[in-house]
Image (cartoon, helix red, strand yellow):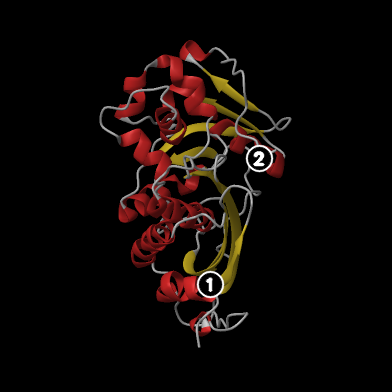
Amino acid sequence: MTLPPEFSLIARHFRPLAGPGSLDLRDDAALLTPPPGKQLVLTADAMVAGVHFLPDDPPDQIGQKLLRVNLSDLAAKGATPLGYLMTVSTPQTTPDVWFAGFAAGLARDQITYGCTLLGGDTSSTPGPISLSLTIIGTVTPGLSVHRFGASAGDGIWVTGTIGDGALGLQVALGKLTDPTGFLLDRYRLPQPRVGLAIGGIASAGMDVSDGLVQDLGHMCRASGLAAEIEAELVPASDAARAAGPDWLTARLTGGDDYELLLAVPPAQETALRQAAATAGIPVTRIGTFHSGAPEVMVRGPGGKPLALDTGGWSHF
């Protein structure tokens, strides 16, 4: 019997991605048993063409980015990835080669990050490509890191370098040159910091997806604290520095970094550095949480407050 087009597409491109619990994608649900002694962590993110990625981005990198932005949320919880559910809505004119590339990108990252497809849905849409992924991870009870929980005196730490994703988007739009291709790669292929053992070390944390200043503001409101950071301490890649000082605001407020933003008590700083060294992930202290109204102060050269004309990315 010939399969209907939707089921044929699933069989060609997505069934090879399926893992334990998926029922080989032959049912309407998956069965999942968490490892003994672990809690499940669930988070979801959506990506829409023209909003979260460019329509002509390579389909394999779109698949990788969809998975990686969700893995970044797990990393911010100190969780280990287990599997994911995915919804794919595309125009009927989307060629089969696009699905092949999209699935190939997912397949590569499933090997890299140790997770498999559990199920989901496919549909057609008259609008742009719309993608959604719900990722499931595990964490030891009591070691999950939350957006709230920071205390006055905690240091503000970030992983990696900040601003590369925002500048990479400008490269893709033809507004900035990128001789090495580093910035464009960082925009298209974020590096989720899975494996950094922050449980029991960070008092609060989240990933930087909507811009450093805006996401730090979210943490301030969640914990009822003020924050102060020094722009000169915010780590920048060589490519971002080469772009020049005119791009500082974009670096501090642009989205798509998917680095971790952490509140770390002074007594835990050594433990953080050791965990980061073990994971091979650079970390940098950029400021401090203080008592006060929930707001973010950015200090520029000489300690003067730095005026920013925007706070960060908004989804609405």
Residue 275 location (% of width, % of height)? 38, 54
Farthest residue, direction bottom: 1
Residue 278 location (% of width, % of height)? 31, 55
Q: Which one is nearer the viewer's eye here, 129 or 38?
A: 129
The residue singled out by tag 1 in the image is 5
Q: Which one is nearer the viewer's eye here, 68 or 197?
A: 68
Q: Which one is nearer the viewer's eye here, 175 or 113?
A: 175
Which residue appears at 54% of the width and 45% of the height?
Answer: 49
Pair 2/1: label in front: 1
Which residue appears at 45% of the width and 71% of the height?
Answer: 14
For the residues labelled 2 and 1, the Cα–Cα distance comes to 33 Å
Residue neighbourhood size for the residue with mark 1, other residues' Cα within 10 Å, grouped as few (<14), some (14–19), many (≥20): few
Q: Which one is nearer the viewer's eye here, 64 or 207?
A: 64
Q: Disc 2 marks which amino acid?
A: His
User: Relative to 172, is 92 above or below?
Assistant: below
Which residue appears at 37% of the width and 17% of the height?
Answer: 244
Residue 296 location (% of width, % of height)? 63, 28
Sequence-first tag of 2 and 1:
1
User: Relative to 226, is 119 above or below?
Assistant: below
Q: Disc 1 marks which amino acid?
A: Pro
The residue singled out by tag 2 in the image is 315
Task: Provide the secondary structure element on which disc 2 rests.
Answer: loop
Task: Provide the secondary structure element on which disc 1 rests.
Answer: helix
Residue 234, located in which quarter of the rendered image?
top left
Farthest residue, direction left: 180
Q: Is residue 283 visible?
A: no
Residue 202 location (% of width, % of height)? 52, 50
